[in-house]
């Protein structure tokens, strides 16, 4: 079986189709993007056409998050190769977002939405930035799916608050086997089809050896990965590519790749963040020790999903409405 027929990097693809009708101005997020990007001819045409293109939808299972329960979750709208991609990310300090390399590869610019809960409505604390600053791991390889990590730089420091806060990075690379991870993501589309509200799902972390035992994954799993079980659940189809995997309030992973068919019960694979501390420090031009200092929560702020290291998964059954997720890799032969 060809790896690209069974595995995909998990971001939502929205095609750009030039020459279609004008942009539906009632789409809130499109209006927000329109305010933020420059009014070049290319960008105006992009706004008129891209958000009404063909949409590959997916349903996110799990539970609806309360408003700003995960204030470090970031929505990324990535314009690359005349296509618009939607990915997740996490705010790791007041000027940098952690995400997957495959999300931003080839990007012309990126719209970064912070403090979002419901993408379909106006939110007073939402902040939106336009940036072309990002750093991809120099050894990212879309063929081997190794080193799927990147950082996106904001044009200016963002004020932190109850609704926009940084996530703490896990200090060491524990195995986390049989521990619960929390994966985050928004609803079906950014165009109002089904929910645009942030959701989270509990995923059971498995050993890398168990993950590599699947023939589809055997040649791809490394110590720089972490896997969650796909049995009885939808896996990281519940999250947005580039988004965080959280254990005990700390980020241990970045959504990277998984099964093309969300019902296939194959594991979901994440970039193992602690293995990349040196790279993150180098990209941000700080020391490794400063990685953990920069992620101190704002004084007096309480947020997030509280869990213990001994919590075990209570699986959610897959819904009948789950759709296949798709991006560039799924089209390779």
Image (cartoon, helix red, strand yellow):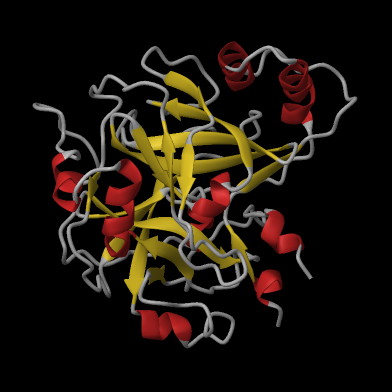
Quarter containing the N terminus: bottom right
Quadrant of the image occupied by residue 207: bottom left
- Residue 55 visible in rendering: yes
Q: Position of residue 258 (x, y in %)?
A: 55, 66
In depth, the one of 100 and 259 nearer the eye is 100
Residue 122 in the figure: left or right of residue 41: left
Q: Position of residue 226 (x, y in %)?
A: 37, 69
Q: Position of residue 19 (x, y in %)?
A: 90, 25
Q: Is residue 79 above or below residue 286?
A: above
Q: Which residue sits furthest left?
A: 300
- Residue 64 visible in rendering: no
Q: Position of residue 31 (x, y in %)?
A: 62, 14
Q: Is residue 83 above or below residue 148?
A: above
Residue 7 in the figure: left or right of residue 234: right
In depth, the one of 24 and 111 nearer the eye is 111
Instruction: Give me the residue at 53% from left, 74% from top.
Output: 266
Q: Is residue 201 above or below residue 123?
A: below
Quarter containing the C terminus: bottom right
Instruction: Give me the residue at 71% from left, 71% from top.
Output: 5
Residue 198 in the figure: left or right of residue 33: left
Instruction: Give me the residue at 25% from left, 23% from top.
Output: 160
């Amino acid at each position: 079986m060809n790896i690209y027929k069974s595995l995909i990097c998990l971001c939502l693809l929205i095609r750009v189709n030039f020459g279609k009708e004008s942009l539906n101005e009632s789409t809130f997020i499109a209006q927000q993007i329109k305010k933020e990007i420059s009014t070049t001819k290319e960008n105006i045409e992009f706004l008129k056409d891209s958000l009404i293109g063909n949409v590959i939808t997916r349903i996110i299972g799990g539970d609806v998050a309360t408003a700003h329960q995960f204030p470090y979750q970031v929505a990324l709208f990535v314009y690359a190769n005349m296509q618009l991609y939607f990915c997740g990310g996490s705010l790791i300090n007041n000027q940098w977002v952690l995400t997957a390399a495959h999300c931003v590869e080839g990007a012309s610019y990126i719209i970064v939405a912070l403090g979002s809960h419901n993408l379909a409505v106006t939110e007073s604390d939402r902040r939106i930035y336009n940036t072309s600053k990002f750093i991809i791991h120099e050894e990212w390889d879309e063929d081997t799916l190794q080193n799927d990590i990147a950082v996106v730089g904001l044009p200016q420091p963002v004020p932190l608050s109850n609704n926009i806060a940084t996530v703490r990075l896990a200090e060491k690379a524990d195995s986390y086997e049989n521990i619960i991870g929390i994966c985050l993501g928004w609803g079906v589309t950014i165009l109002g089809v089904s929910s645009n509200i942030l959701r989270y799902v509990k995923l059971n972390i498995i050993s890398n050896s168990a993950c590599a035992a699947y023939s589809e994954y055997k040649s791809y799993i490394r110590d720089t990965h972490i896997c969650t079980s796909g049995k009885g659940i939808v896996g990281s189809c519940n999250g947005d590519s580039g988004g965080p995997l959280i254990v005990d309030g700390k980020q241990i992973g970045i959504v990277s790749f998984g099964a093309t068919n969300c019902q296939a019960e194959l594991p979901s694979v994440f970039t193992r963040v602690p293995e990349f501390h040196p790279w993150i420090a180098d990209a941000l031009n700080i020391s490794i020790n400063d990685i953990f200092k920069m992620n101190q929560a704002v004084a007096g702020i309480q947020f997030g999903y509280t869990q213990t290291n001994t919590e075990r998964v209570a699986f959610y059954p897959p819904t009948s409405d789950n759709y296949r997720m798709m991006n560039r890799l799924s089209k390779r032969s």
